[in-house]
Image (tube, rainbow, N blue to C red):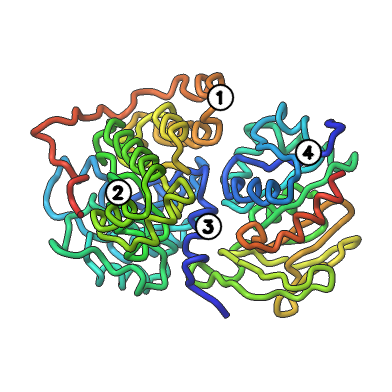
Amino acid sequence: MAKNTFKLKSGLAQMLKGGVIMDVVTPEQAIIAEQAGACAVMALERVPADIRATGGVARMSDPKMIKGIMKAVTIPVMAKVRIGHFVEAQIIEALGVDYIDESEVLTPADPFYHVDKSNFKVPFVCGARDLGEALRRIHEGAAMVRTKGEAGTGNIVEAVRHIRTIAEDIGSLRTLNKDGVRRKAKEYRVPVELVEQVKKLGRLPVVNFAAGGIATPADAALCMQLGVDGVFVGSGIYKSKNPAKRAKAIVEATTHYNDPEWLARVSEDLGEAMPGLEINDSLTKLASRGH
Amino acid sequence: MATKPTIGVLALQGDFAEHITALRKLKLPCLEVRTIADIKKTTGLIMPGGESTTIGKLLVSTGLDAWLKTHVKKGYTIYGTCAGAILLSQLGLINITVKRNAYGRQLDSFDEPIQSKAFPKLRGVFIRAPLFTTIGKGVTVLATHDGDPVLVQQGKILAGSFHPELTDNLAVHRYFATLAK
């Protein structure tokens, strides 16, 4: 019986498309997320806004908390591990989690390498700012990609930057001849075949979500109209005044992203959004972690 | 209802784009369905894989659940895959009971040949798949895996627990198109 193949790993990501994956730190939050219509939840120790506020090293969640979340909901459960921390990944896999996010939101554990994801049975999602970074992660075995954005800021600008950069990088492959593709592969430090494949498909060969800074239904719809397959939302929900209502509105907006009247309706009367942060020099850039 | 055969793919959440690609490969007219205005242009609907809790809530907020219940009685055709099959059962549109995530979590997802006289050489991609636990009156089993039913039909309703849209064998889609005429 074929199990844990790349087809099955990327296949689960295909089932998540058009959906919203919500950060949760407790089983109670997971239930709120499921009831709001999340297609999966992401277990982590603290939402990014709290990681920024309290500082210190951010690590994977307590396995007991993850097990509690897995028990509380029927939708897929993802969990974050630190960049390069393959033992955290082994532990999460042992818990039977459905997807691992090797995430820059946690404090990196390895200054040289990301996790060799092809060694694992459980599928991985990873963040990327540009095509080279996305392809390096896919080459390491990631079965799903997301933008890094700038988590915990409630500011969508970096996610938009990463979506547009990846799209433009893919677009610029179109005019390249064989030598040009080979040069790009060398620049990106990935096999030529992978670059060829992206050139042929005109998109990433795996599902690509937006993440980092989504705080409103309009933010989610913006990312969808820019061509991503779905969205991750974290601090944007739990740092707002009415998390359950906002979560549901973001789910609706991700489905009806092309329908302004629908978006207007679900954006109404949601209470205050998370305060948000300006992206400036004094801000710690989580997106610059990893390579 | 539409007069020209057009297959809608429920595009609330899930792998609807893969179903659209499959239908286009077969050169069948198709469109994404998110509203009642969309579904009125169709003669049949594919409910894709995805998360049944998510799609179920969006069916209610769009009013499509009520539309489907009314129109299936009048002979509207639906094919539900995975989450879509769960929803068919939950909406009472097919006489089967379904157990969600019956094979386990993602680590238990699998890809194996399935047994079918109607559709030879079919592979079953099962992702956190449901199991059809009871097959009621009027329901025919079209394919099995390990003795369990994985593709069933009741009148013009088809339900499958696997994902042919993730493979090159589109025989089930082709068959569904003949029902949706």
Precedes in sequence: disc 1 or disc 3: 3
Who comes first in sequence, dot 3 or dot 2?
A: 3
Q: Residue at x 23, y 52 (%)?
A: A104
| Horizontal and vertical percent position of residue A57 | 14, 55
Please say if the residues under marks 4 and 3 sit with CB atoms less than 8 Å apart. no
Q: Amino acid at mark 4?
A: Thr
How far apart, in angstroms, are the residues tagged by discs 4 and 2? 39 Å
Label number found at residue A128: 2
User: Which of pointers 1 and 2 lies earlier in the amino acid sequence?
Assistant: 2
Instruction: Look at label 1 and name its amino acid.
Output: Asp
Q: Are marks 4 and 3 on the same chain?
A: no
Q: CA distance from mark 3 to mark 2?
A: 29 Å
For disc 3, the marked residue is A74
Callout 1: SS: loop
Q: Residue sitting at 72 percent across and 53 percent down?
A: B80
In the rendering, at what x and y percent does residue B110 appear? 57, 72
Q: Position of residue A63 (x, y in %)?
A: 31, 66
Q: Could you tell me which residue is drawn at 43 percent across and 32 percent down?
A: A246
The residue sitting at 65% across, 57% down in the picture is B165
Tell me how far mark 1 sits from mark 2, CA to CA: 28 Å
Q: Quadrant of the C terminus of chain A?
A: bottom left
Compared with B147, B58 (above or below) is above
**SS at circle 2:** strand
Q: Quadrant of the N terminus of chain A?
A: bottom right
**Residues at discs 1 and 3 in contact (Cβ within 8 Å):** no
Q: Disc number at residue B6?
A: 4
Left or right: residue A164 compared with residue A224: left
The circle drawn on residue A259 is 1
Front position among marks 3 and 2: 2
The image quadrant that residue A168 belongs to is top left
Of marks 4 and 3, the one in the foreground = 4
Q: Amino acid at mark 2?
A: Ala
